Image: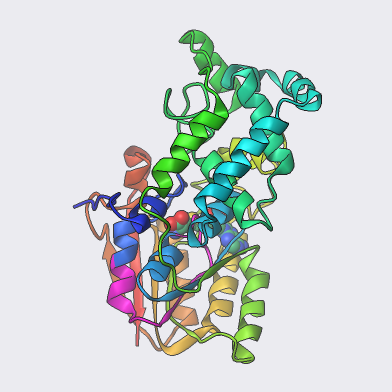
């Protein structure tokens, strides 16, 4: 049965930050962490996404280390692990609101491509441009938290987001969206972005911020970041992980680049849906590259694990992804026992959450133990 998020706690409110393609349901992540680790253990996720596994570890008395190559996933993950103080974030949102009235943002808001005019009202466009310019999400916890909240509400259902009617999880292509809005005579909501975000911040902070064990998510490619973490472990700065808990990108299914183009724009990317992300950002469609990615990342991750570590991988049940992942895991961890669970808990899968029933063959859990 699907577990619902408990919004009565700080951990429950922050766990849902933010909508992300192929994210772990939080109840599932909590269960896996509890079953396979004890308090004080380290959990590693080299494909961290919005940081569900790491946040689950951090809020259950474990520590977590994650790596994520998409700035969208990174901002969500890092913001929820270390949310800045409410009043600082609220203050920053107001500051951006004031800056947004400057002539340069009025001008640049006018010059944006047609999609933006149909998607956002003029004050929202100006606010987004100022936020894009000013919020230092790489370095400042306050700015990153403000950006994370802004990313959550950037697009979604009418009334629930800053945009004209759109899906929340996925950015639609500009041409498709414009056609749809014209056909439905849909107009961008006339909202004051500062008021809108201030009330969303109040909800998010109403139960405080979660107590997190010291945990982090690195922004980058696991191929290069894992060896850096291994060096930290060799120096004795970090213990080895008891649980490798991850979900690699699915072969040929999701595109964390094209499908997220509007949020990526807000983080500094181009103002159009770029199809030409490199292969690490695309749809993971090249078989040999895909296999290399999995084998290189799992081989590097192995060096960060305790001998008795559990490896818990959730992935797509479709043939190529399933067989490639199985082969890589068997080769990387030849002495471990393997358990395979198909569609582990009905209604509690990642694909279920984004409503893609027809196109997917469900998911599979591959669990290796000593
Ligand atoms: C299935 S998603 C993980 C979702 C995650 N379990 C969650 O709950 O949000 C796979 C993630 O791997 C990331 N990724 C792909 N290649 C990567 C790489 N080389 N290094 C780090 N992250 C990578 C993608 O950007 C994507 O966010």
Q: Residue at x 37, y 75 (%)?
A: 61
Note whether residue 56 is visible: yes
Toward the left, the furthest residue is: 1
Q: Nearer the viewer, residue 370 or 268?
A: 268
Rendered view: 210 above or below 177: below
Q: Nearer the viewer, residue 147 or 354?
A: 147
Does the magenta run of residues contain 283? no
Q: How many marks?
A: 0
Note whether residue 273 is visible: no
Q: Nearer the viewer, residue 33 or 207?
A: 207
Rendered view: 171 above or below 305: above
Does the magenta run of residues contain 45? yes
Rendered view: 201 above or below 116: below
**Percent x, y for residue 150?**
55, 39
Q: What colour-coding does the image apply?
A: rainbow
Image quadrant where residue 12 sits: bottom left
Start-end of magenta stretch: 31-51
Rendered view: 177 above or below 153: above
Q: Nearer the viewer, residue 67 or 198?
A: 198
Q: Quadrant of the C terminus?
A: bottom left
**Percent x, y for residue 88?**
58, 49
Task: Please state if 159 lies on the left or on the right of 116 as rendered.
Answer: left
Q: Residue at x 66, y 36 (%)?
A: 96
**Percent x, y for residue 47?**
52, 63
Task: Please state if 235 lies on the left or on the right of 157 as rendered.
Answer: right
């Amino acid at each position: 049965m699907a577990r619902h998020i408990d919004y009565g706690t700080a951990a429950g409110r922050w766990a849902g930050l933010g909508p992300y393609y192929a994210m772990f349901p939080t109840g599932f992540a909590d269960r896996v962490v509890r079953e396979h680790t004890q308090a004080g253990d380290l959990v590693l996720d080299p494909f961290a996404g919005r940081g569900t596994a790491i946040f689950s570890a951090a809020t259950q008395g474990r520590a977590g280390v994650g790596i994520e190559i998409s700035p969208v996933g990174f901002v969500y993950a890092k913001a929820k692990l270390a949310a800045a103080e409410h009043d600082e974030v609220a203050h920053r949102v107001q500051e951006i609101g004031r800056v947004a009235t400057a002539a340069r943002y009025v001008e640049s808001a006018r010059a944006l491509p047609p999609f933006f005019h149909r998607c956002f009202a003029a004050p929202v466009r100006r606010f987004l441009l100022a936020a894009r310019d000013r919020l230092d999400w790489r370095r400042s916890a306050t700015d990153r938290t403000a950006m994370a909240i802004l990313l959550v509400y950037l697009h979604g259902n009418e009334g629930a987001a800053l945009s004209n009617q759109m899906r929340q999880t996925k950015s639609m292509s500009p041409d498709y969206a414009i056609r749809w809005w014209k056909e439905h005579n849909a107009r961008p909501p006339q909202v004051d972005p500062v008021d809108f975000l201030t009330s969303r911040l109040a909800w998010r902070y109403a139960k405080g911020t979660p107590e997190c064990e010291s945990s982090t998510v690195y922004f980058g490619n696991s191929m290069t970041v894992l060896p850096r973490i291994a060096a930290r472990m060799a120096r004795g700065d970090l213990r080895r992980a008891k649980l490798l808990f991850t979900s690699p990108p699915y072969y040929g299914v999701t595109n964390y680049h094209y499908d997220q183009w509007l949020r990526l724009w807000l983080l500094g990317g181009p103002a159009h849906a770029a199809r030409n992300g490199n292969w690490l950002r695309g749809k993971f469609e090249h078989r040999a590259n895909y296999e290399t990615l999995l084998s290189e990342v799992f081989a590097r991750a192995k060096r960060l694990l305790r001998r008795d570590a559990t490896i818990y991988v959730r992935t797509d049940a479709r043939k190529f992804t399933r067989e490639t992942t199985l082969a890589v895991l068997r080769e990387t961890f030849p002495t471990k026992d393997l358990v395979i669970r198909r569609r582990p808990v009905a209604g509690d899968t990642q694909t279920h959450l984004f409503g893609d029933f027809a196109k997917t063959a469900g998911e599979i859990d591959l669990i290796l133990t000593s």
